[in-house]
């Protein structure tokens, strides 16, 4: 596992990671662990200031030296394409700027001598053997779609997360401060043109240092855009399409084949058989910082990674992760329109959304009206009550609210509900008002930070398999470009990524440009559940049950119903299975090693 971090305090650092190397010559309290490509760990030192840029970034050497001479500006996260964090060390303080998409997260933990910070929460947990944070785990299990519940917390007790788009300052004299330095800000001009430019730059900054780039070619908008932009930027790319063995046409596969006809794309098909089914091989997942999004599909994900590594030799793989969260307007936009008195458009977009979701328009409009008049703090207080009781006080179907949570899963224990409810109450007390017209951009920014940070766990899984994985839709400048679209120009929630379709005009195949749906993988998941039924039943009696968060008998009934074909929301199953697999991987993995600083003076 590769990560970077450091220490800041009144005295000298007392413990350091095993096998560390200094980020720059002479640095005893800033380090990197694991193998870092030179283009993802760049440093400059001038006078009494040292600067490091960690992660893929388009900064030039003269620009890097200029920051070392003059200091790092607060808008550094969106000055260049890429997903990166920036570190500045002076005699007075260590300062870290986080990216906007959470792809390069920064965590902290405080000791008596000062503060340790790192890009890995598990690394910091290894300092004192910190256990998983059961409060955070309960909130994530019971309300996984309410991202604000876990903001500022890692998956480990005593390890905090620095929010995306913030500046962390750690003075040498002790203490710390976190300041927000980015907000979505409306800008005029062509949003499609900005998106095209930023996605192109995000792709280019990766392929400039790659010799064998590959990309998912699933037949959807997001992965297709990245493959085509790679070719347009002057690099051939291998498009990888996974498909059920024996099925070589239809649906997503036809869209992928049409795209693969473009010059510069080499199309490779990877057939999926029974060993790649969802819920398979959940006991062999490498340990990562938190439950990975691909946990349920790990058999397919790891199989594809190994296949691309061995058959293609990929040294840069693109996925479209983050595209859905960024490019699809959240339903709370309807409340935004009402709040700024765009009533006619609010009615139009509500009826279109209702028609798409097969809901009655009037109740949906009334829900949007209530949300436009409800403070976010009150919404979290209401959510706290719902989580505590285990049932909603409002209709979950078609609700347009601040907390569009799913129903509390039936297997949640009283203790899990109390923990999640307490988290919601704490968030209610800390949340700040959101101005009218900024509801959707605020929730989208929070959602992207959650998507990017959790996707970091998939990147760690890919690193373990020897594949550099990249998600350009989570890049800071891409996020900033899209969330700068003014409310009156933003697509409605019923629209399917029209800005990306416009941005890719001239590149997208005609058939794809008119697509308004995605492939449905739910049948595969239910089939995988049936195939791995015995192993899943064993998981139900695992670490979550021992921690008092899950009622194993109820979870078994839920799993049995799903495996039998009874309609069960996958949100009532997948988080519990993913969390259980992650907890088991923690138990079997060696903790991150730390040692006394004076015993390894000079680093490794």
Image (cartoon, rainbow, N blue to C red):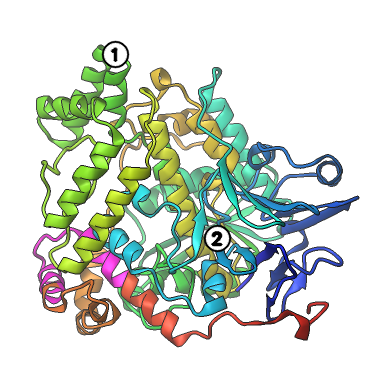
> Hey, which residue is sitting farthest right in the picture?
47
Query: Residue 278: in sight, yes or no?
Result: no
Q: Nearer the viewer, residue 32 or 373?
A: 373
Q: Position of residue 24 (x, y in %)?
A: 82, 63
Query: Residue 467: in sight, yes or no?
Result: yes
Q: Residue at x 24, y 12 (%)?
A: 344
Q: Position of residue 501 (x, y in %)?
A: 45, 32
Q: Which of label 2 and label 1 is nearer to you? A: 2
Location of the C terminus by quadrant is bottom right
Q: Which of 416 and 42 is in front in this view?
A: 416
Q: Position of residue 175 (x, y in %)?
A: 61, 55
Q: Give the range drawn in magenta.
A: 555-578
Q: Any magenta on residue 575? A: yes
The residue tagged 2 is 107
Residue 28 sits in quarter: bottom right
Nearest to N terminus: mark 2 or mark 1: 2
Mark 2 to mark 1: distance in Å? 41 Å
Q: Main secondary structure of the magenta part?
A: helix
- Vertical placement of residue 347 versus 85, above or below: above
Q: Which residue is drawn at 60% across and 69% down?
A: 112
Whether residue 240 sits left or right of residue 140 in the image: it is: right
The residue tagged 1 is 341
Whether residue 135 sits left or right of residue 288 in the image: it is: left
The secondary structure type at the circle numbered 2 is strand
Q: Where is residue 442 in the image (x, y as percent from the top left)?
A: 41, 35
Location of the N terminus by quadrant is bottom right
Q: Any magenta on residue 518? A: no
């Amino acid at each position: 596992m590769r990560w970077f971090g450091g220490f800041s305090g009144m005295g000298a650092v007392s413990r350091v990671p095993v096998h560390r190397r200094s980020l720059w010559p002479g640095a005893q309290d800033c380090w990197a662990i694991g193998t870092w490509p030179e283009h993802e760990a760049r440093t400059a030192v001038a006078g009494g200031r040292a600067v490091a840029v960690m992660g893929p970034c388009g900064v030039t050497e003269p620009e890097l030296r200029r920051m070392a001479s003059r200091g790092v500006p607060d808008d550094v996260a969106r000055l260049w394409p890429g997903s990166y964090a920036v570190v500045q060390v002076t005699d007075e303080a260590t300062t870290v700027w986080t990216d906007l998409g959470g792809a390069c997260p920064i965590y902290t933990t405080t000791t008596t001598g000062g503060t340790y910070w790192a890009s890995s929460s598990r690394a910091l947990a290894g300092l004192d053997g910190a256990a998983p944070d059961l409060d955070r785990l309960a909130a994530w299990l019971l309300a996984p779609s309410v991202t604000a519940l876990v903001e500022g917390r890692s998956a480990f007790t005593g390890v905090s997360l620095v929010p995306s788009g913030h500046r962390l300052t750690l003075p040498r004299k002790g203490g710390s401060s976190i300041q927000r330095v980015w907000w979505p800000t409306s800008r005029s001009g062509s949003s499609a043109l900005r998106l095209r430019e930023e996605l192109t730059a995000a792709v280019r900054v990766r392929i400039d240092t790659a010799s064998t780039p590959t990309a998912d070619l699933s037949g959807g908008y997001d992965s297709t855009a990245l493959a085509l932009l790679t070719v347009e930027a002057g690099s051939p790319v291998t498009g990888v399409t996974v498909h059920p063995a024996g099925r070589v046409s239809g649906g997503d596969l036809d869209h992928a084949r049409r795209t693969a006809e473009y010059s510069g794309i080499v199309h490779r098909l990877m057939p999926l058989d029974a060993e790649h089914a969802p819920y398979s091989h959940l006991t062999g997942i490498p340990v990562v910082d938190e439950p990975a999004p691909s946990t349920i599909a790990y058999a397919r994900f790891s199989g594809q990674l190994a296949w691309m590594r061995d058959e293609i030799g990929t040294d840069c793989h693109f996925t479209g992760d983050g595209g859905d969260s960024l490019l699809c307007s959240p339903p709370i936009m309807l409340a935004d329109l009402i709040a700024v008195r765009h009533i006619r458009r609010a009615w139009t977009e509500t009826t279109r959304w209702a028609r798409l979701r097969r809901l009655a328009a009037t109740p949906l409009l009334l829900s949007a009206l209530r949300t436009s008049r409800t403070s976010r703090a009150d919404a979290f207080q209401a959510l706290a009550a719902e989580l505590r009781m285990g049932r909603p006080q409002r209709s979950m179907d078609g609700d347009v609210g601040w907390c569009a949570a799913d129903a509390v899963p039936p297997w949640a224990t009283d203790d899990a509900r109390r923990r999640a409810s307490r988290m919601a109450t704490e968030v209610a007390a800390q949340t700040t008002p959101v101005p009218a017209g900024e509801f959707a951009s605020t929730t989208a920014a929070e959602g992207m930070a959650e998507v990017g940070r959790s996707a970091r766990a998939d990147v760690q899984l890919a690193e373990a398999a020897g594949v550099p994985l990249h998600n350009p839709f989570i890049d800071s400048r891409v996020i900033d470009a899209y969330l700068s679209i003014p409310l009156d120009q933003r697509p409605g929630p019923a629209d399917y990524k029209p800005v990306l379709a416009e941005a890719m005009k001239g590149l997208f195949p005609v058939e794809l440009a008119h697509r308004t749906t995605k492939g449905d993988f739910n049948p595969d998941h239910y089939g995988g559940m049936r195939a791995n039924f015995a192993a899943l039943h064993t998981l139900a009696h695992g670490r979550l049950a021992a921690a008092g968060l899950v009622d194993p008998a109820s979870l078994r009934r839920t799993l049995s119903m799903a495996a039998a074909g009874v309609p069960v929301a996958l949100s009532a199953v997948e988080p519990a299975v993913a969390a259980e697999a992650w907890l088991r991987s923690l138990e079997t993995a060696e903790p991150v090693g730390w040692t006394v600083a004076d015993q390894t003076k000079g680093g490794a």
